[in-house]
Image (cartoon, helix red, strand yellow):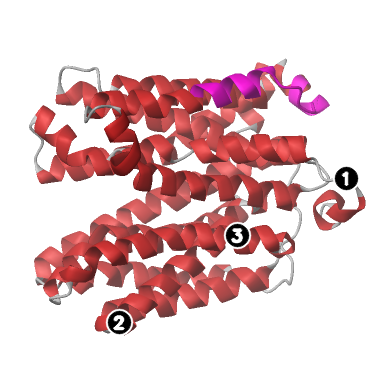
Amino acid sequence: MNQSAAHPATQAVPYKMLIILWLVGWTLRVPILAAPPLATRISESFGLGEAAEGALTMLPVVAVAFGAIPAAWIIARFGLRAAIVAGLLVMTVASVTRGQVSSASLLFFASGVMGMGVAVFQTALPAATRVWTPTHVALGSAVYLNGMMMGELSGAGLTLPLVLPLAGGDWRFALVLWSVPIVLIALLVALIKVPKEQAETDNAALPGLCQQGSLPRWDDIRVWQYGLLLASSVVAFFVVNAYSGSILQSRGEYGAAEEFHFAYNATPLLASFVVLIRPGWVGLRGPIAVSALLTILGLAGFAFMEGWLSWASALVAGFAATIELILLISLPPTIAKGIAVTRLSAGMTLIGFSVAFLLTLLGGWLADRMEWIEMALVPSLFFMIAALGGLGRAVRYPDYE
């Protein structure tokens, strides 16, 4: 275990860099989750059907997964600060472009580019916690992920009641308004003095070394171990959000859908505060194992029970899955150093998000074939049970090189 991650309390808390990390974390999901509340208006503008509307919502997430690998090379080649600023600006320009294009194909292209921009600075953030808050790595991870959860609520919860009215009801201008704070945050990161790691400068000067050393090692069992564990936490949240509306409708409970979705999507923020209070959980097997078990029980309860017990089970699943997600995303900067942080983060992101996406699609396909909507949750549930085998036996996860 790296000493700086294991014993953070001996030095002063770097409040300035924690604020920067929180602000950058806040931007991670705002443009992505501002789109679903505007989906009906966007669909009407471009004549999209339901399938295309759903694909438009998921496309940036898929781009984040597959963009993690080129993002790792960019970070190693140009450095953390440049990658974060560039990713923020690419994401912002592409997000605004969604409202300025003239065709559905260009809309999808802009959404994909936006996801690639997110991938660059999302992949950079774990390494940034190691460089910018070296004596408080776990706290830095918890802080930026708390910002991300707050950004999720901001994008999903403030777009319709606040931003759209400020935009005069114009969804295109609403995207422009959301871009303003993100550009300001990018400028702040570009101008503020941040700690610099010598290895970062050295890597930037050696393109060949960057290309070889920054990419995940696919023959490394630990990349798959942590990536599949990440997939089990991501899919738990994806699959409930994707199919809960149809499940509630099939049970005659759709009247509670609005309250259910609000409560469910509030669980990540609550979970992030728990990890913020207990950053010492990062790197330990026990909290991840307990969270994984609670997530499985919660998802099973939502799938096979009805009424308030089912709803409560889903909230447990959302809360526990987010704790597991935060602990796993925080793992690379805690157990690795230098370029190994980016390499491990990129591999975990690609495996975790792509597997979660495929499981969500598989569940929907099986539900249609069997005409049983709860079947949409079953593949994810079986996968999550199988993924428990990847927890390992060590009390603390060993260093990664």
Q: Which residue is mark 3?
A: 273
State if disc 1 and disc 2 touch (CB < 8 Å): no
Q: Which mark is residue 12?
A: 1
Horizontally, residue 171 falls left or right of residue 351, namely left
**Residue 185 is covered by the magenta coloring:** yes
Name the kind of residue labelled 1 in the image. Ala
Q: Earlier in the sequence, mark 2 or mark 1?
A: 1
Query: On the image, which quarter does residue 173 sit in?
Result: top left
Indicate the position of residue 56 as horizontal and vertical percent values.
24, 38
First in sequence: mark 3 or mark 2?
3
Give the residue at x 75% y 35%: 16
**Along the horizontal axis of the image, is 218 left or right of 114?**
right
User: Which segment is the magenta one?
Assistant: 183-201
Give the labeled residue for mark 2: 308
- Which type of secondary structure does the marked residue at label 3 adopt? helix
User: Tag 3: Cα neighbours inside 10 Å, few (<14), some, or many (≥20)?
Assistant: some
User: Is 265 part of what is drawn in magenta?
Assistant: no
Q: Position of residue 149 (x, y in %)?
A: 50, 50
Residue 177 picture location, percent across and down: 38, 26
Task: Work out whether residue 70 or residue 181 is closer to the camera in this orientation and state it.
Answer: 181
Numbered disc 1: secondary structure:
loop
Give the image location of residue 221, x and y in percent: 59, 56
Residue occupying image coordinates x 76% and y 20% = 201
